Image (cartoon, rainbow, N blue to C red):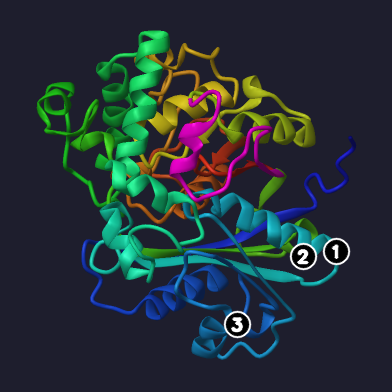
Amino acid sequence: MSYSHRGECSISGIGATDFSRKSGRSVVALASEAATRAIADAGLERSDIDGLVRSDYDAVQHNDLAYALGMDNISYWGATGVGGAAPCGMVAQAVAAIVSGQATNVLVYRALNGRSGLRFGRGTAMQQAAGAPRLGGGGSYDEYFLPYGLLAPGQMFALIAQRHMYEFGTTSDDLGRIAVAVRQRANSNPAAMMYERPMTMDDYRQSRVISSPLRLFDYCLESDGACAVVVTSTERARDAPKAPAVIRAVAQSGSPDVQGGKTFPALMRPTITTYPSKYAADRLYARAGLGPADIDVAQIYDCFTITVLLELEDYGFCAKGEGGPFASSGALDPGGSLPINTAGGNLSEAYIHGMNHVLEGVRQIRGESVNQVAGASTCLVTSGIPPMTSALILAEQ
């Protein structure tokens, strides 16, 4: 299938707030700051923005942000999810709006008080805060797992990790190598919550088990903050103050055995070691005219270390079942074949549902990262699993 939108759009501006455990600010204020910075970075005025795309998990509605920033020229708005599966798909919506002529400059944003406010890792507390009962009537199917003790995302991903270990011999140290690799990137990133807070493999091994086999440092951070990007046509982006990060391709995907619900029902699939990322990868590479060997650096979604390992396999950087040895081989380090999460990722920079991965991908293409990969001309950015997922490839113009 031909893909006619290759390279037609670019990210011309990026912006973020500080990342913290307690912002002391409303999510609208956070979104406004990140958006203002992204618009300025793109060399635009607020009146130039005519499209808005948000996550369906974001409490900041389109009209909230438009009102806060005095935007009176909005002709397109959209939303996608679920949660961590959304960021690259949000960029995909912006691309679709631009190539179809519905907008010219689209602001894509994500803002949350994910530590001081609604903490997505708190299981039933999250369900009840959203108004859902413990059992029945929630409409997501996830509530039917709660009576059996499956309460929080970490428990689900622990089961997935156990299965991968059983099937393929993956070890806890393989997961630890991922955690240590991204922490090292955060240690030199002043914007990261784990800046100058080193962690060794011994530190990882000695950290407490939260849901076996996952330890404290296998879990992402709970963070307050916001990120935003401006998507426009590549032709317009050439007039921006900085070189555009060309969107070589975007893709969204489910899987042949997709099920309802937000998270837990994925455990009922025939396999829990391959995810929609496998099918997104196939579409993405075909649309980009590239393959895994063409990727110079990657920002891999890391709500948990096992997520990185699964996506390394699904995006073709190693064979199924070989993610553990691949992670432990040094391939993910700065001088390795696939440096990842160069700002620290969800595990050690901040957890903005992976929107911060998109920003770091742009920095790598611009040559602005604090952990710049020499000669990086392509960057893969992935979003979360398991319900559905999305991904994109950024490239130099």
Amino acid found under the numbered disc labelled 2: Ala
Query: Is 174 located above or below residue 222 in the figure?
Result: above
Tell which tag, 1 or 3, sits nearer the viewer. Answer: 1
Disc 1 marks which residue?
100
Q: Quadrant of the N terminus?
A: top right
- Using the rendered image of the protein, determine whether residue 220 is visible from the camera's viewpoint: no
Q: Which residues are magenta?
A: 250-272
User: Which one is nearer the viewer's eye here, 342 or 145?
Assistant: 145
How far apart in space, not on screen, are marks 3 and 2 (Cα)? 18 Å
Residue drawn at (32%, 69%) of the image: 129
Dot 1 amino acid type: Ser
Residue 235: horizontal and vertical position, in percent? 80, 59
* Of pointers 1 and 3, the one earlier in the residue sequence: 3
- Left or right, 119 with respect to 206, comes to right
Crowd rating for badge 3 (residues with CA inside 10 Å; few <14, some 14–19, many 20+): some
Q: Earlier in the sequence, mark 3 or mark 2?
A: 3
Residue at image mark 3: 46
Query: Residue at coordinates 12% horizontally, 22% vertically from top-left?
Result: 202
Q: Is residue 40 above or below residue 115?
A: below
Give me the C-alpha separation between circle 1 and circle 3.
Answer: 22 Å
Does the segment drawn in magenta span residue 269? yes
| Neighbour tally class for label 2: few under 14, some 14-19, many 20 plus, Cα within 10 Å | many
Q: Secondary structure of the magenta portion, mostly? A: loop
Compare residues 70 and 120 and report the one nearer the observer.
Answer: 120
Depth check, front residue: 11 or 66: 66
Q: Where residue 97 is drawn, which disc sits there?
A: 2
Local secondary structure at mark 3: helix
From the top left corner, tell me how far across and down residue 2 is, in percent.
90, 37
Q: Magenta span has 200?
A: no
* Real-space CA distance between mark 2 and mark 1, rounded to the nearest whole angstrom: 5 Å
Give the image location of residue 259, x and y in percent.
59, 42
